Image (cartoon, rainbow, N blue to C red):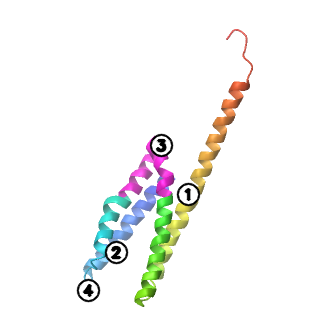
Amino acid sequence: VGGALVGLAVLAYAALTSLVLTTVASPTGVEPLLRPQWIVDYTVGNPVLLLGGVLLWRRARLGYVAAAGLLFLSGVNGVAFAASGVLGALLSASPIDVPVIAVHLVISTISFTLLALFMRGAANRRRAASLRSQTAQSAPARPGR
């Protein structure tokens, strides 16, 4: 899961950089509403995904604490970006950018799938620890110990 978070962050950086370079190079210039979104993505959103993935990959406690929230946030953001892309196109009577919508929905699907796997793994570990604890408590004491 840590590697997947790192991969999502790297792909998000690549996609955002491509979008920024394409938009800046276009003759129409940059829409003022995009600048704050880019700044937030570069300085907050993507670094948090990257850092959380690296921490989880290194099996740091903070990585385990943050992973579920990061995966959930990534999934919800993908759905929100896809919905806003469709609604924005419909409200402005412009064409829907299907590849962008598809990418966001794929990211959401990956994030929610990884979240389900992560939560299932956490539940299995908790169940195994509980069984070990019960077994240790119910085991008869050995003489001489």
Q: Helix, strand or loop at disc 3?
A: loop
- Between the residue at mark 1 and the residue at mark 2, the CA separation in whole angstroms equals 26 Å
Determine whether, in the image, residue 122 is placed left or right of residue 60: right
Q: Where does label 3 land, which residue?
A: 59
Q: Earlier in the sequence, mark 1 or mark 3?
A: 3
Q: Which mark is residue 19?
A: 2
Mark 4 or 3, nearer chain start: 4
Name the amino acid type tagged 2. Leu
Name the residue rendered at 40%, 61% in the picture: 10
- Quarter of image, res 33: bottom left
Q: Residues within 10 Å of mark 1 (few under 14, many from 20)?
A: many
Q: Residue at x 34, y 73 (%)?
A: 18
Foreground pick, 121 / 35 = 35
Dot 2: what SS?
A: helix
- Name the residue located 51 percent from the left edge and 59 percent from the top edge: 72
Q: Is residue 125 above or below residue 101?
A: above
Name the image quarter holding residue 131.
top right
Residue sitting nearer the eye, 36 or 118? 36
Measured from the top left, where is residue 84 in percent x and y?
A: 44, 77
Amino acid beneath label 1: Leu
Q: Is residue 51 magenta?
A: yes
Q: Which residues are magenta?
A: 47-71
* Mark 1 secondary-structure assignment: helix
User: Can you tell which mark lies on residue 114?
Assistant: 1
Whole-percent x, y for residue 16 in the image: 35, 69
